Image (cartoon, rainbow, N blue to C red):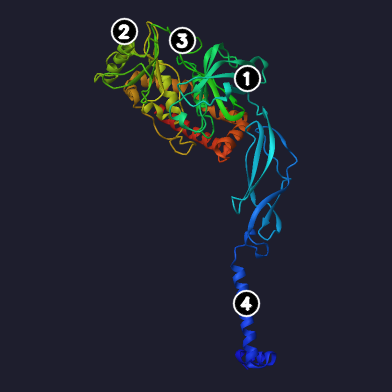
Amino acid sequence: MNNTANLRTYFNITFGNNKKRKHCIIVIILFLGSLIFACRLPNTEMSLNAKGTLDSIRIIKQPDKKNYKMGEELITADLVVENVYTNESTKITDNYYLSGDTFTSGSICITVISKLDASKTDTFNINVSDELINTGLPVIYIETENAAPIVSKEDWVSTKVKVVSDNPEYSFEKTDYQDQIRGRGNTSWWYPKKPYRIRFRENTSMFGLTAARNWVLLANYKVATLMADTVAFELGQRFDGPLFKNHYVYVDVVLNGQYNGIYILTEHMRVDPGRVEIDKRNGYLVELDVYYDEDPKFTTRNLNLPVMITSPDFGANIEDPGYKFVKDSLNEYDTLLSDVKFPNNGWQDKIDIDSFVDYLLINEIVFNNELNHPKSVYMCKDVGGKIRMSHLWDFDWAFGLGWAVTVDVSTARTRFDGGKFKQFHKDLNFKAKYKARWNEKYSQINSMSEFINITAQKIKISHSLDNRRWHEGAINFEEEVNKLKTWWSNRISYLNSKINN
């Protein structure tokens, strides 16, 4: 007997007459259909028909830990949350996320948000102290008067400053709002994490450095390792040549009761003792920068170099007679470099070759593209001296950086156009000095990977806080450090071959 006949016999025996048989078949089909439909339902807490749809979420046990230091990780392992459904049934859930952090002092509301429906929330409060956790770095606490926001690069805001360091000699507190702070930078000012300039009422030493009124806090928002500036500054220190050298101190900054991130404190380069040490009235310090946004300013006659005068200061009017010697000197530089007879035109009588060798070599090592615009290029001249490069600055676009080491330019040769810097390589004497300087400093250059390792360990905890504060934890610090070291190794190997050949 075939299977169809067997099934027909089974139904005849089991269900009897046709009417009863048809009724049972319909019931079976409906039952099987309901099973199939149920299997197709999404397997989520919201789709459990027995519980209805999600109506709300509710905290039924708050975390035991309520008091935190600033920057401390939230501890919520003992937090218990339940889903409440439209039929008033409940179910314990871990299908939620938290909004809120410990970066601001005071009573802080932490929001529990359902992953099933972000409109369903509940909250609990924690208390955050005004003391930052120990990261191993010194902390600068900045409090503006009446908690005024810092929203401008031009307008100063009154502030008081407290520095807390493991070295008691570096710790101090100024409480009378007699000091000032404002924004700084060009492109960097428009990032979420802002750079700042501090101006003390009187000369103040920071971390044992030469006392001065003005100091800079570099934010390094777009540099994943936070090391672009410090690697370049360290190279400047190791070259120990004619350039003025920036020092650097990693610090954590708390601004108006909120952790603002890890910064690099360094000198604000101006004509001062311990900074650019030239005559304030008869020497000059200028910046070449395509932003061309600070008076007094002028462009040179042939190369159209955008020159902004930092010192001397005779007011904003570039036509003031006090600025004539600055314009004459930079136009002479322009003429020498644009001369068709270059390099056979006696340029070394007017331009300090050693400062240009160090400056261009260090910028080539780190592949700093800012020179091509040019941006943040500083030159100076003292009384009776030659035109020379002043100091190293601005490495946000070095190392092939977008905001991390992602572009493979470790094997690319740099020929800077900004200010016609590439002209110098046409001079055989310059090229010989360039090669000699590379080989003289090769061991210090090559050993920078160890500096990167040491620095990474030093800033590791603060980097983690900064990463959570500004990048939602998106940066893999160890990976970025390894990429930087690989880039450095490839870069030095490549340049060693090219420069010596």
Report the quarter where the N terminus lies: bottom right
Q: Is residue 200 left or right of residue 378?
A: right
Residue 250 visible = yes
Instruction: Identify the residue position indicated by label 4 in the image.
Output: 32
Q: What whole-number distance in Å separates the C-alpha atoms at marks 1 and 3?
A: 27 Å
Instruction: Identify the residue position indicated by label 3 in the image.
Output: 277
What secondary structure is marked by label 4? helix
Q: Which of the 4 image quarters holds residue 474?
A: top right
Against 83, is 301 above or below?
A: above
Q: What whole-number distance in Å separates the C-alpha atoms at marks 4 and 2?
A: 98 Å
| Residue 96: image location, x then y, percent | 64, 50
Instruction: Identify the residue position indicated by label 1 in the image.
Output: 163
Residue that lies at the very extreme toward the front in this rendered image: 87
What secondary structure is marked by label 2? helix
The residue depicted at 71 percent of the width and 57 percent of the height is 90
Instruction: Identify the residue position indicated by label 2 in the image.
Output: 321
The residue depicted at 53 percent of the width and 12 percent of the height is 212
Q: What whole-number distance in Å separates the C-alpha atoms at marks 2 and 3?
A: 23 Å
Q: Which is closer to the viewer, label 1 or label 4?
A: 4
Q: Which is closer to the viewer, label 4 or label 3?
A: 4
In the rendered structure, which disc, 1 or 4, sits on the residue that comes first in sequence? 4
Q: Residue type at mark 4: give it.
A: Leu
Q: Nearer the viewer, residue 369 or 473?
A: 473
Q: Which of the 4 image quarters holds residue 187?
A: top left
Please rate how many residues cluster around mark 2, counting C-alpha atoms within 10 Å: few if below 14, some from 14 to 19, many from 20. few
Q: Residue type at mark 2: give it.
A: Pro
